[in-house]
Image (spheres, rainbow, N blue to C red):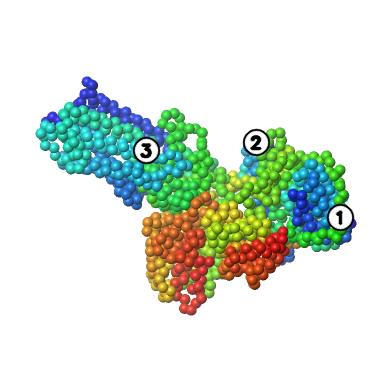
Amino acid sequence: MNILVCVKRVPDTAENEIEVRPDGTDIRREDLVYSVNEWDNYAVEEAIQIAERTGGTVTVATVGDADAEEVVRREMAMGAQQGLMLTDPAFEGSDGRGIAEILKAAVQRGRYDLVLCGAQADDGAGQVGGMLAALLDWPYASLVNRIEVLEGQRLRIGREIEGGNQEMSEIELPCVLSIQTGINEPRYVGIRGIRKVASVEIPALGASELGLDPSRVGRAACRVRKLDYFVPPAGAGAEILQGSPEEIAARLVDLLKAKGGLK
Amino acid sequence: MTAQVFAFIPHANSRIDDAAPELAAAARQLAPGAPVTALVAGDGAGVEAVCAEAVRFFPEVWKFAAAELAYPNAELLRPLLSRVLPRGAIVLFSHNTLAMDLGPGLAVKLDAAYLPDIVAFEAPEGQVLRAVRQEFNGQVSTHVACDLSGGAVITLRAGCFAASEPLAAAGRVVDRSADAQGLAARRRFLEVVPAEVGDVDITKEEVLVSVGRGIGDKENLPVAEDLAEALGAVVSCSRPVVDAKWLDKSRQVGTSGKTVKPKVYLALGISGSFQHMGGIKGNPFIVAVNKNPKAPIFQVAQVGVVADVLEFAPVLAEAVRKAR
Amino acid sequence: MEPALIPPAAATLAGFPARLVFLLIPAVGVGLFAWILRRRIEPLLRAAPDDRFNRYGERVAAVLRLWLAQARQPRYLLAGVLHIVVFFGFLILGARSLQLVVLGFVEGFVLPGFGGDFGAAYHAAKDVAAAAVLVAVVVLAVRRLVFRPARYAVPERYGKDHTPEAILVLGLIATLLVSEGLFEASLVAAERQLGRPVQGLVPLTLPWALAALLGGVSREALQALHLAAYTVHDLTFFFFLCFLPFGKHFHVVTSLFNVFFMRLDPGTVKPVRHGVGEAGLDALETFGVKRFEDFTWKHMLDFYSCADCGRCSDRCPANRVGRPLSPRFVSIKARDLCFRRYPLRGRPAAAPEPLIGGIYSEDEIWSCTTCGACEEECPLGIEYIDKMVDLRRGMVDDGLVPQSLQKPLAAIEKRGNPWGKMEKKRGDWVLGVGEGCRVKGFDKGEQAEVLYFVDSITSYDDRMQKIAQAAARVFCAAGLDFGILGKDEKDSGHEVRRFGEEMLFQSLKEHNTEAIRASGARWIVTTDPHAYNALRKDYRDLPPVRHASEVILEALSAGRLALAPEADGVRTCVYHDPCYLGRHNRLYGAPRQVIDRLPGLRRVEMEGNCRDRSFCCGGGGLMLFYEPEEEMRMGVVRVKMAREAGADLVVAACPFCLVNLEDAIKVAGLEGELEAVDLCELVDRKLARPGGPGAANGQGGMA
C-alpha cells in the first residue's frame, strides 16, 4: 500500500506561555522552537507500521517554506521513504481549503492508496483532511484511532467518539483518514537518525509543477481570514469564596454553569 | 441577511443533545428575524421523538428518516445535506466528533466557508461574520472574519452559547425523507465499542474532579466520585493517590501522568505541585478546595474554597443536583 | 619400605594395569574440558571489542583484593565466610587433587616443592582444609534446603529454581572430600594394622575420623576401598571440571579473569564502540547492543562468571520495589541465551535474535537507575551499568523509547532542558536569591573565578530552584567569586547519555564545553551530583570540578562561614548518600563533616544502608519522567529507613534525591515526622544573619 502522510511544522508550545505581539498580528515567534505537529507524527508512525505489514511506501508531504523541510526530514528519519515539499510563494497565507487544494494536486500526481493527516494541528481547526477527501471525492474518516487492513482494498477503522467510545467502520480504499493521538506509540527519532537522512534529496513542487490555478490558493483565496490574536483575560490568583459551605456551593454552581462544568 | 440558516440537530437515544437549544439561539443571533430550520436525521421512532423535541426550539424542522440514517454516518449525511441544502445556506453544527467528520467535506461540497469550533461571534455586519476561535490548546484566541455570502458551515463549541428558551409556539415538522432515499457511502458503520470500565480517558474529559492526598484515605474516594457523578465529570488524581494505589495510573494528572485539557478542573485536596500543574493545559477554569490556605494550588486556581474536602464536597454535590 | 596397600599406579584391575585407566581418565577429562572451553570462548571471539588489556598494576591489585582476599564476601557475613572457607579450601586442596591425579600413573608422585617439612605441613593443612570445607558444604546445603534465603529464589518469570544445581555441586564437593579422605584413611588403617606408626594425622579431620572407623576392616577390604576411593575421586574430579562450564560454577574458572578485566572507573560510561572515537560515531552502522554478539567480550565473560549469589538483586533498588528488573537475571538470561546460541555440538546459531523482546523487555532495561549498587556488591566484578546503557543505545537507535521519555529528550534537543522551557529563563531562579547576594552571569559578559554549573532541573523546577538559591547565598557568605552560564548553559546530558541517547549527549557536551571554556572560570562548583559526575567523568579537559559539599566544608574549616547559634534545640538527622556522589565518586566524608559542624544537629546513620550501600532515592534526570511499573517507590523505602534510624531530618546532597524524598515523605504519610532538606539549604538555614529575613528562606521544605 502506498501511503501519503500530510504533515505540518508547528511551534512547540507545550511548556511555554504563548505571547501575542503588541500589534496583535501574530503570536511572538522569536523564542519559539518548531517541530512536527504531534497528531501528524502519530499518522506517520501508523503509515510506517501499515507499510511494514503490507509492503509499499510512505511519502511525507508538507506545504511550507524551506524551514518546513526539517519536519519532513525528521519523519523520513522515522522511516518514511520519500519526502515531498510543496513550496511556492503563491501558497502563502492559504486557509485550510487552500492547503487542501494544494494537497489534492500532490495526491493526484502520485499513486496513493491511502492519505493520512493528523486530526488537528496548532490552530485546532481539524479541517484539511476532510476537505482533501471531499476535493478528491474519496471517503473520509476523522479521529481515527485504529486501522486494520482487510482483504479487497478495504480497511476496518475505529474512530474515537464521545465518552471514549470507539466507532468501528469499514472504509474503501483509496480514502483519507485523519489520525487521533494514541493510535500507536510513535518511535523515537534521535539526532543520529536525522543525520542519516540529512543528505537525501527532497523534491520541491510549486504551483506550476502541480498544475494548480494560483487563484484557488494563497491569501487571496481565503474565505476565512484571521484578523488578530489576543489572550483571553486570565484571573490572577484564586478568588477565595467566603460564607457558609452552602452559600459557597451555591455560588460555585453558578460559576460552574457559566464555565461549562455543569451541562 | 437573506441567507437561509440551518441547524443540524445532534441527538442520541431518541433525545436531542443539550447543544441543540444553543444552536437555536446562535442561529437567531446570526440571522435576526430569518427563519431557522432544524435538520434531523435518523430512523424509526427515535427520529420522531427528536423532531417532537426540536419543534420546541425551531419554527421548522426537516425530518430525514431512513434506515441507513439509524446511526449518524458522516459519509451518508454529507451527500444528503449537499443534496437538500440551498446554495448559500449557513449550516450550524455543534462542534462534536460527528461535525468534525462531516463539516469540512460538507463545506467543500457546498462550496461554502468553514468556520470550526467557534466560541463566540459578533452580530454580522453585512455579509461578514466576526467570530472568536482558540488556537494552541486555548492559550491564544483569534478573531476571524468570514464572508457569508457564499454560505458557510459553522461549528459551535458546546457550552459557549446560551441556550434558547422554547418558542412560544412550537414549530412544524416537514418530512423530507424522500430526499434521504438511496443514499450510499464507501464507509459502512459497523458498531460502537463502548469504553472499557476503568478505562476512562481523562485527557479527553471536559470536567475533571481531581483528588489529591487531601482526601486522606481510599475509603474517602466515594465522596469525590459522587461529586463527579453529579457533575457528569470523571475523577482524576495527583501522583500520591496513584502511588498509594487508591486509583489507577490512567487517572493521574501531571508531568509523570496524563496531560489533560479540561474546561473545568476541580482540585480537591491537591496542593498543586509544579509536577501536577504541568499536566493541566488549555487554561481550564480551576476550582481549588483545600484546607491549607497557603496551598500553591490557590495561586493558579481561579476560585478557591478553604475547607476540608470531605466536608465540602458532599455539600457541593447536593447543590449541583438541585441545580439540575 | 613397601606401603601397606598397593598404590593405584601399581594396581591391576581384572588383570589389567590400573595405571592405564588412571591415565585415560585425566586424558579424556582434560581433553573434554579443553574442548568445552574452546566452545565457550567462541562467542567471545565474535563479540564487540573491549579495552581491557591495560593498567595491569591496578588489575593485579583488584585481583589481590577481590579475588584472593575475597574482600567483598564478608558484606554478606555468613555466606561470605562460608565462601571464603570453600575458596581457600579449593586453593589448598587443588594441589592435593593434582597430586592424586598423577599418583594414578606415577607411583609415589609428589608435586615439585611439596617434599620435606613443607610437604608434611601441607599434608596436615589439606586435611584441616578438607574438614573445614566439608563443614561449610554441610552448612551451605542446610541453608539451601532448609532456610532457603530469599535472594536465591527464582521468580516464576525467570524460570525454574536453581537449587538442584547448587545441591549437585555441593554433593560433588563432598564426594571429592570424602573420597580423598577414604583414600588416605584406608592406607592409614592398613599401616596401623601392620603396627607402623602413622604421624601427622590431625585430630577431627576426615582421615583421622575415617581411619578410626576402618580400624577393624580386613586388609583386602581396605585395599579395595583404597582403589575404589581413588577411582571415585578421579572420576568426580574430572566430571566436576567438565561440569563447571555448564552453569553458575563456571565462576570457579572465570572469576580470576573476570576480576582482572573488571571495570576500574566507577561513574564512567563505556564508549559506543571501543576503538571508535567521537568523530567516528556517525559512520557506525548500528549503535549499542541489539543482539547477543553486540556485547563486548568482557560483558560475555560477566555472564559466564555470574555465580547466581543474588547479591546484586538483593541490593538493587529497582528489584526491591518490584520493577521488572533483577540484575542477577540480566546475567543468567544472557548466559542461558549464549548456551543456546552456541551449543557444544553443531554450529552456532546464525540468525540474529533481538535481545529486546527476546530475553529482555523494554521496561526491564529502562527500570535501571544506574545507581551502581549491584556493581558495588558483586564479588566477581560483574558490571551492569554499561550493559544497560548499551542496551538502551540499541533501543534508542531502533526508536524504542517510551513516550514519557521522548518528550523530555526532544525538549532537551530543542531547548537544552527536559521541559522545553525557554533558554532565556534558565537563569531566572537568581531573582529569588534575595538581598545581599548577587549572582554574576557569564552570559552577560561578567567574569568570575568560579563557575556554578546549575544544570537543567535545578534551574527550572520551582522546588529545586530553592537549592540553587540557598547554594548561592552560602557561596556569597563564603566570599566565593562565582557566576553562572545562564542561557548559555544546557543540560549536562548526564542522564541523556545513560539513557542511551549518545549523539544528543555529544552535542550537549560540545556546547557546554565551549561555554565553560569561554567563561574563563578557574574551577567549577555544582550542587547536582549528576552534573558533577558528568563534568568529571563524561566531559574532558575542563577546569577542576567540585561538589558544593566540598566547597562548603572548606569554607567552614577556614572559618569563612559564620553560623548562627542554635536556638531551636537539637534535631536528629541522617545523611542520604546520593549515588552519583557516593558510589560513583566516593565522596562520603565531606557532606557528613559539613553536617557535623552545624549546630543543633545530631547525626545518625542508616546502618547497613549508607555510604557505598546507600539505597537509591528513585533516580534523577530523565528517570523523573519515566513511568516505571513498580509496587512501591524507592523513595518510600528510603524515607522509612531514615525514620527507622531515628531521624526527623533527612539530608540529601542532590536535587533529585531531595524531590524524591520529599514526595516519598508525603506518600509514606510521614509528614510532620520527617523532613527532607538539601545540604545547601541546611547550611543556608544555619548561616548567621543578624536580624535578616533571609533565614526564613530555607524553611519551606515541606511545601
In this rendering, position of residue C522 left or right of residue A82: left
Comparing B219 with C199, the one in front is B219
Residue B17 x, y percent position in the rendering: 76, 54
Q: Nearer the viewer, mark 2 or mark 3?
A: 3
Instruction: Mark yes or no: residue B178 visible.
Output: yes
Q: Give the quadrant of residue C397.
A: top right
Q: Nearer the viewer, residue C150 or A28?
A: C150
x 84%, y 54%: residue:
B55
- Furthest toward the left, the residue is C195
How packed mark 1 is, by other alpha carbons closer than 10 Å (few <14, some 14-19, many 20 or more), is many
Circle 1 SS class:
loop
Q: Residue at x 81, y 54 (%)?
A: B54
- Which circle marks residue B171 in the picture? 1
Q: What is the distance, in whole Å, between disc 2 and disc 3 at their CAs?
A: 49 Å
> Which residue is the site of mark 3?
C165
Q: Do tag 2 and tag 1 residues touch (Cβ < 8 Å)?
A: no
Residue under numbered circle 2 = A55
